[in-house]
Amino acid sequence: MAPLLRGTSGAARPALFVAAAELSYLAGYMAADALRTGLAQRYYIQAGRLADEARAR
């Protein structure tokens, strides 16, 4: 997701990153529910990075 969002600009940029972070968090939750803890951790880390990017600008 992040490479696709890097080219975005304008007022919608933070909202797009927040939406991507929420999707990544949901994927992590689903992976954790399926007992795939390593995969869940990667999704959670990515969700945090996307959320940080949303606040960065």
Image: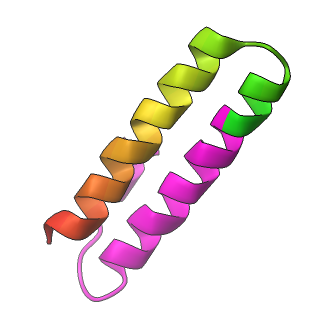
| As drawn, 45 above or below 11 | above
Residue 17, quarter of the rendered image: bottom left
The residue furthest right is: 34
Horizontal side of residue 13 vs 28, given as left or right: left
Does the magenta run of residues contain 16?
Answer: yes
Up-down relation of residue 57 to residue 47 (above or below): below
Question: Is 42 positioned to the left or the right of 48 in the image?
Answer: right
* Span colored in magenta: 1-28
Residue 40 visible in the snapshot: yes
Q: How is the image coloured?
A: rainbow
Give the side of residue 2 with respect to residue 37, left or right.
left
Q: Main secondary structure of the magenta part?
A: helix
Q: Quadrant of residue 10?
A: bottom left
The residue nearer to you, when weighing 44 against 5, is 44
Residue at the image position 33 percent from the left and 74 percent from the top: 14
State the image coordinates of residue 46 (x, y, percent, origin top left).
42, 36
